[in-house]
Structure formats: structure tokens, C-alpha cells
Amino acid sequence: MGMTMTQKILAAHAGLDQVESGQLIEAKLDLVLGNDVTAPPAIDIFNQTGAADVFDREKVVLVPDHFTPNKDIRSAEHCAVMRRFARTMELPHYYEQGEKTMGVEHVILPENGLVAPGDAIIGADSHTCTYGALGAFATGVGSTDLACAMVTGETWFRVPEAIRVELRGQLSPHVGGKDLILFLIGMIGVDGALYQSLEFTGPGVASLSMAERLTICNMAIEAGGKNGIFPVDDRTLDYLRQYAPERFDKQQYTVWTADDDASYVRTIEIDLAEVPLTVSFPHLPDNTKTVGSFDPVVIDQVVIGSCTNGRLEDMRLAARYLKGRQVAKGLRLIILPGSQRVWTESLKEGLLEIFADAGAVISAPTCGPCLGGHMGILAANERCVSTTNRNFVGRMGHPKSEVYLAGVAVACASAVLGRIASPTELEEVLS
């Protein structure tokens, strides 16, 4: 029996020729990751083990991003724990606020050349599955598993079953990767891929940018997926070489492809041309509706950014829709570039000026409002269109607030018109 991409990566890291779904394995890890929410308890557990050092200083990554810049004493103390640990262990991959390489964890790891095709990665953050866009196996774990992995460099997995998502064609104008993943989640449900690997394949993959693939894999967990993964192609390698040519020109990675006779629990076929502009209504990501199919929804706030849509491509797209336009009166637009690199390049390209002229608040790189942390919390009865990845009850603030998930194009149109809207409506109203 053949193996899927995920199964091949796990087999290689477990030192096995073959694995099958349901099998329990112990796998060596290429990277372990923690942030300012999950790393402090992991560090406490690590210290309790009595270990003198981490398993490999080059493979432990700590990123303060959720409550940074620190919003209160507690968040400052959490970051101080990380900072001291990184200093004591002499970890080269601790990314301090303000550094040129800092930002939101799932944006900066690829930017800093830390993720390679064929890697096995765990992170104490559920959206670690983002890195599947680069042909890696990546999944989220808890702080206890992170602590153990920092000591041993290994962790256990139950090999997941796989769903094959066959893509063909290309997306329509204004429709992006965020619309595609929301459309898929709406199709199969928030538990439709529970502990399964979402393996994206087919001729349509070539039409998707790397930013779109990263967005799609980022939200695999919102369908219950263990991980999401794309095959490696020339676009993948060009992206990797852009950020770390010294590593990826030397081909220090392994590309795995699925066998023709690999087993899948099901195959989902999607014609990309049929994917509509999609919005996820409160209070679950699978509560999706096509833009234009519902009565007007007046909103109070729009957030553009996060580990889902905070990359340079997203900033450029936002500037395209906001240039020469104004945010609706009484509405707050918050834009969060995903990294210092994205922020700086957006400044150089004049994107930040476009945002400021439109009436947006421009933030430092942070998770901030995505998790209801700071920098854009919602009051009772307020509605927000957000390019983030979750819209649970109280996710971005008050339990009586509402979050509507969308892509950058819909978010920008909504910010200008003051209600959930499509870019086509924006052009028609303001023409």
C-alpha cells in the first residue's frame, strides 16, 4: 500500500520504511515552537525535568507575539520568562520585539528560512499547521508536549488518515485563498477532517500563490485537521530561496510526493472557478455564506492581518482596494502587518501611507485582536469583519460581539462601505 505525503514524512522521521493510518509512532523533530502564551508553562515543565539543555539549540524557536507589545504586567512577565530562558539556553531563534526578523510566529518562521520541505514540526499553537504550505508536516501541540520535545527532540503521533482535496482551474477575480479555505470548511464542517490530513493536490495548485497556500494550511485546524499540506513545486522553492538562498540553493531538504496508490478516506474535488467570495458568520468557521446572498450586515470594525492574512501580498492587496478611498464614518479599520519585514517593506512601497490616508490604524506586528488580546477588542453588540481565523463566541472581545471571517478583498470593501460587501459593490458604489 502506498503512502500519502504526510505518511512519508512521518515514516522518515520515525526511521520506518512504511506507516499506516492509526499507527502510533515516535518521531524525531526538525523544529519545536512556542509563543508567549504557551512557552512559559512549557519552560516551567522543562525546568522540573532537571534537563541541563535543550536537545538542539538551532531547533527550538520562541516567539513573543500574542500579547506584544506587552499589554499588562502578566504578559510582560510571560515574555520575561521566555527571554531569560532563551538567554540561559543560548537560543539563536528567539525573536525579540523590534528586531528586523520579529513578528507573528507563523509569518516569520518561513521568512527566516526555518521551515523546509519534508520537515516534521510541532508548535504549541494550533495554527502551526501553516507550514504544510511548504511541504512540511506541521501540527499544534500543548505546552506539556512542547516541554518534552525541547528535552528529547522527539514526540509521538498517531498517523492520521488523509483527505485528498483535488483542485483544478483557477480562482475568479477578487476571490483568494481565504475564500477557498472558508468554502471548504463550510462544505465539510469544523469536524469534517477531525485528526485527518488535508492533502491539497491537482493542477489547480499551480495557480495559487504561496501566501494563499499559507492561508489555506493555516486554517486546516478549523476543519479539525491534524495538518494541511501542499506538494512542493517551483513556486515553493522560489519562495524559500527568496528568504534563505544560502540554505535552499544547497537543497538541504527532502521533497515527498504521494504514491499513486496512497489511501484516502475520501476525495473532494473543487473547481476553483466556482469558489465564491465567502464569509464565515458567527460563531463557527463553517457557518459560511456567499457574499451577496444575505441581507446587509452593518459593521463597527475591520481587522486585516494576523498569521492568516498578514503577509506582504495581503498588504499589497489591501492597498489596491483602499487607495484613494476612505473608511466609512464611525468604523474602525485596524491593519496589522504580520512581521517587521512586512511592515518595513509596506513602508518602502508606500502601502502604509495609503492605509493612513484611508483612515486606518496601523499596528506593530502582533496577534493582538485576533485572540481578543489587545489592540482592537470588541464591545458588546459590536460586529467585526476580520481576516483572522476564528470567530468563536467572545473570540475578539465581549461574548455578545460578533466576528465575520473574510478575505482581504471583502474586508477592504466592507471597511469602505460600512457593511459586509464585495469589491464589485465597492467599485459600483464609488464609480
Image: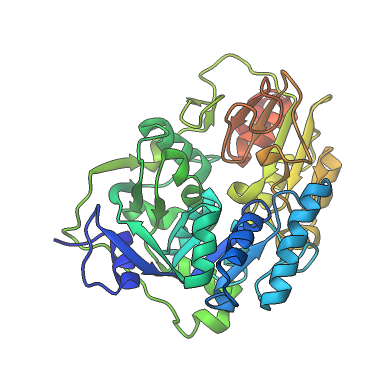
Image x and y of residue 404, in percent? 60, 29
Q: Nearer the viewer, residue 246 or 141?
A: 141
Image location of residue 41, percent across then percent down: 63, 55
Say which residue appears at 74% left-offset and 20% top-offset: 380
Query: Which residue is rendered at x = 68% and y = 78% of the image?
Result: 90
Tell me which colouring the rendered structure shows.
Answer: rainbow
Horizontally, is 99 left or right of 104 in the view? right
- The answer to whether 93 is drawn above or below residue 282 in the figure is below
Q: Residue at x 25, y 44 (%)?
A: 267
Placement of 132 over or under 283, stated as above or below: below
| Horizontal arrangement in the rendering, residue 402 relative to residue 283 (left or right) | right
Extreme residue in the top direction:
295
Q: Give the residue furthest to the left.
A: 1
Q: Quadrant of residue 260?
A: bottom left
Where residue 398 appears, as percent x and y from the top left, is 71, 25
Q: Nearer the viewer, residue 356 or 387?
A: 387
Give coordinates of residue 80: x percent, y percent. Answer: 78, 61
In-image side of 287 versus 246 (left or right): left
Can see residue 334? yes
Q: Quick check: 271 left or right of 63?
A: left
Q: Residue at x 35, y 36 (%)?
A: 192
Q: Quarter of the image holding residue 359?
A: top right
Quadrant housing the C terminus: top right
Report if residue 238 is visible in the image.
no
Quarter assignment of residue 411: top right
Q: How many marks?
A: 0
The N terminus - image quarter: bottom left
